[in-house]
Amino acid sequence: MARDCALNFISDLALPHQTEMLDLDYFAIDRRRFLTQIAGIAAGAALTVACNNDEAPKEQFTLSAKPKSVPMTYTAGSHAEVAGGMNFQTYVPASALTRSVVPIMIVLHGANKGVDSLMSLHRASADAAGVIVVAPISADFTWDAIHTRFGVDVSGIDSVLKFLFDRIPTDWSKVVLSGFSDGATYAIGLGRANGNLFSKIVSYSPGFILDCPPVGRPPIVISHGTADGVLPYSYTQGTIVPTLIAAGYPVDFQSFDGNHQVNVPTMQAEMTKLGA
């Protein structure tokens, strides 16, 4: 649609790729507020032409990977891996190796690709709950649909999941998609488009709702700090949560006193539930 192309074009101008090395908090506020407020503005003629270009790549939403019963071939510890051109990190606690059905928490990073800090944050809970934690790494500075459209990162995540499902015995009831910041926004979008694959979506401080064709109605947990200086708490509370509820999703919205961060008590609780 013309409006979608307008948003993509403006987003690219508002936050060029080079800013991943600059003050991300400053740029994140401007870009995301602009994206959420621009929805009612009509696209210009040039953007309409670009959007209707038959050569524009089509969006890819669907993940084809399917969990299955296979022998566990992982060893305990941290693994840096590549599948289908996508880099990702996997943490396998020793407590997961003896399980017949292994829980997997997929964690999507924010715009600064802070994978190491996310993995460290989850490690103790993974050990306690016997949950494997997997952190894919986006092809660009953030996830594709945040600044353009669903496509290359969906394909990459699909390859990562196929790689995992060939090596880890699990089923859909034990696969959860989570994310922080841009990753939280992306998790809500990709998770809704693949509600038959993920048993739950966990979103830490999202920014807006991405358009996607929904499949199923997986439960969604959203946590957001009331003092968030990057992605406004008020927008999550007043727009994201009510919109999802109106669309029929079971939403557990958890506010906390804090800034732009993963709420550790929520993360620990979700890891424990997944590992139960």
Image (tube, rainbow, N blue to C red):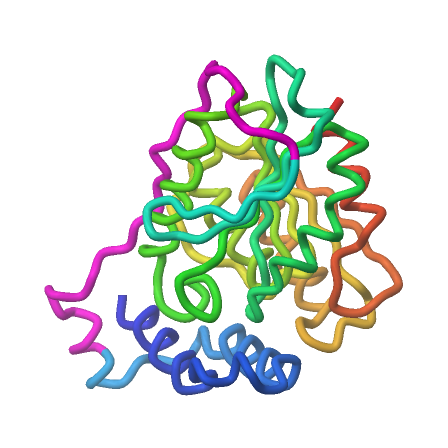
- Residue appearing at x 55%, y 69% in the figure: 111
Is residue 49 toward the left or the right of residue 140 in the image? left
Magenta range is 48-76
Tally of marks: 0
Q: Quadrant of residue 32?
A: bottom right
- Residue appearing at x 58%, y 58% in the figure: 109
Near-viewer residue (153 or 194): 153
Task: Give residue 117's position: percent from left, percent from top.
Answer: 69, 59
Q: Residue furthest right?
A: 257
Task: Give residue 273's position: percent from left, percent from top.
Answer: 75, 29
Near-viewer residue (98 or 146): 98
For the C terminus, give its image quadrant: top right
Task: Give residue 64's position: percent from left, percent from top.
Answer: 34, 33
Q: Is residue 109 visible?
A: yes
Magenta residue check for 63:
yes
Magenta residue check for 258:
no
- Residue appearing at x 45%, y 59% in the figure: 138
Q: Quadrant of residue 103?
A: top right
Near-viewer residue (258 or 215): 258
Near-viewer residue (64 or 249): 64
Q: Is residue 171 visible?
A: no
Residue 253, placed above or below residue 4: above
Q: Residue furthest left?
A: 54
- Residue appearing at x 42%, y 56% in the figure: 211
The majority secondary structure of the magenta stretch comes to: loop
Residue 62, placed above or below residue 185: above
Task: Give residue 135's position: percent from left, percent from top.
Answer: 56, 49
For the N terminus, give its image quadrant: bottom left
